[in-house]
Image (cartoon, helix red, strand yellow):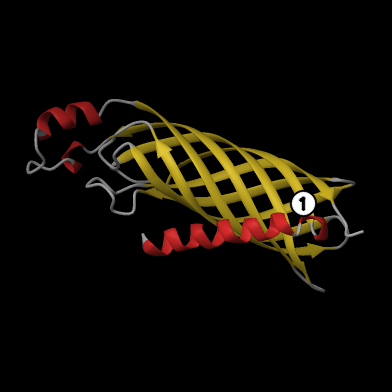
């Protein structure tokens, strides 16, 4: 929990520094759409589709790599159902009612602000591959047996491939995602999903005068 908050604070400070030095760097804005589902298990189902608005800033470029930070407002539309009713144990208060409630198919909305760091490796003049790690706060509107509604965190690790065509970059990004509330509430099993997303990015260059 503390490490996540420190990461968010450090990232926000970095964003302020980037804004102060805007004319010295390269910005890009993009949009991604994706789908995902839980890793195979016997306890629950979880599927989602999601939309991401993305703001990239290139921090540094070397001979072989590019280093970028990324701000991503995101919205997720998910469905979830408990399959194993014994996941809700008898010591849980009002466990019979909760088993009945939690085994119903539920629609879940998640609203996320993810903050990421990306390392990109160009391959020729058109293609590049990259690794991305991100973390951010989120709000979920539905309580389940795995997590209470309200405040939580979303962690993502992704590998991707991009193709540059003039100012546009087309993106394919498989990822894994973990959602939990970092122990802020009693129900904190969270969700683990595998995802695939596609999108495009528009480069906006602002060179120093």
- The x and y percentages for residue 143 are 29, 34
Q: What residue is pinned by disc 1?
A: 27
Q: Is residue 47 above or below residue 204?
A: above
As drawn, the residue found furthest toward the bottom would be 63
User: For this view, does 151 lie left or right of residue 93?
Assistant: right
Q: In the structure shown, which secondary structural element does the residue marked by tag 1 occupy?
A: strand
> Can you say which quadrant of the picture contains the C terminus?
bottom right
Task: Tell which of 168 and 16 is nearer to you.
Answer: 16
Q: What residue do we see at 12% from left, 43% from top?
A: 89
- The x and y percentages for residue 145 are 25, 38
Q: What residue do we see at 70% from left, 54% from top?
A: 19
Q: Is residue 131 visible?
A: no
Mark 1 nearby-residue class (10 Å; few <14, some 14–19, many ≥20): many
Task: Tell which of 82 and 113 is nearer to you.
Answer: 113
Q: What residue do we see at 23% from left, 38% from top?
A: 84
Query: Residue 47 falls in which quadrant of the image?
Result: top left
Query: Residue 146 falls in which quadrant of the image?
Result: top left
Q: Is residue 33 above or below residue 131?
A: above
> Can you say which quadrant of the picture contains the N terminus?
bottom left
User: For this view, does 77 lie left or right of residue 32?
Assistant: left
Task: Tell which of 50 and 150 is nearer to you.
Answer: 150
User: For this view, does 19 lie left or right of residue 127?
Assistant: left
User: For this view, does 29 lie left or right of residue 24?
Assistant: left
- The x and y percentages for residue 163 are 80, 50
Query: Residue 134 falls in which quadrant of the image?
Result: bottom right
Q: Is residue 98 visible?
A: yes
Q: Is residue 164 above or below residue 45?
A: below
Q: Is residue 194 above or below residue 69?
A: above
Q: How many marks?
A: 1
As drawn, the residue found furthest toward the right would be 209
- The x and y percentages for residue 159 are 62, 57
Q: What residue do we see at 36% from left, 49% from top?
A: 180
């Amino acid at each position: 929990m503390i490490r996540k908050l420190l990461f968010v604070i450090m990232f926000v400070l970095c964003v302020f520094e980037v804004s102060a030095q805007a004319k010295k760097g390269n910005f890009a804005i993009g949009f991604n759409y994706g789908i995902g589902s839980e890793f195979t298990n016997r306890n629950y189902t979880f599927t989602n589709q999601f939309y991401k608005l993305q703001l990239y800033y290139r921090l540094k470029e070397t001979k072989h790599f590019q280093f970028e930070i990324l701000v991503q407002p995101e919205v997720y539309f998910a469905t979830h159902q408990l399959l194993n009713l014994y996941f809700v144990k008898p010591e849980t208060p009002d466990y019979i009612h909760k088993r009945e409630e939690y085994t119903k198919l539920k629609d879940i909305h998640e609203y996320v602000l993810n903050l990421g760091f990306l390392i990109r490796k160009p391959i020729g003049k058109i293609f590049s591959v990259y690794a991305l790690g991100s973390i951010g706060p989120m709000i979920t509107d539905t309580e389940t047996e795995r997590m209470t509604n309200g405040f939580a965190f979303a962690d993502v690790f992704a590998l991707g491939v991009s193709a540059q065509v003039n100012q546009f970059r087309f993106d394919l990004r498989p990822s894994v995602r973990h959602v939990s509330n970092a122990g802020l509430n009693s129900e904190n099993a969270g969700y683990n999903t595998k995802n695939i997303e596609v999108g495009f990015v528009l480069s906006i260059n602002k060179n120093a005068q």
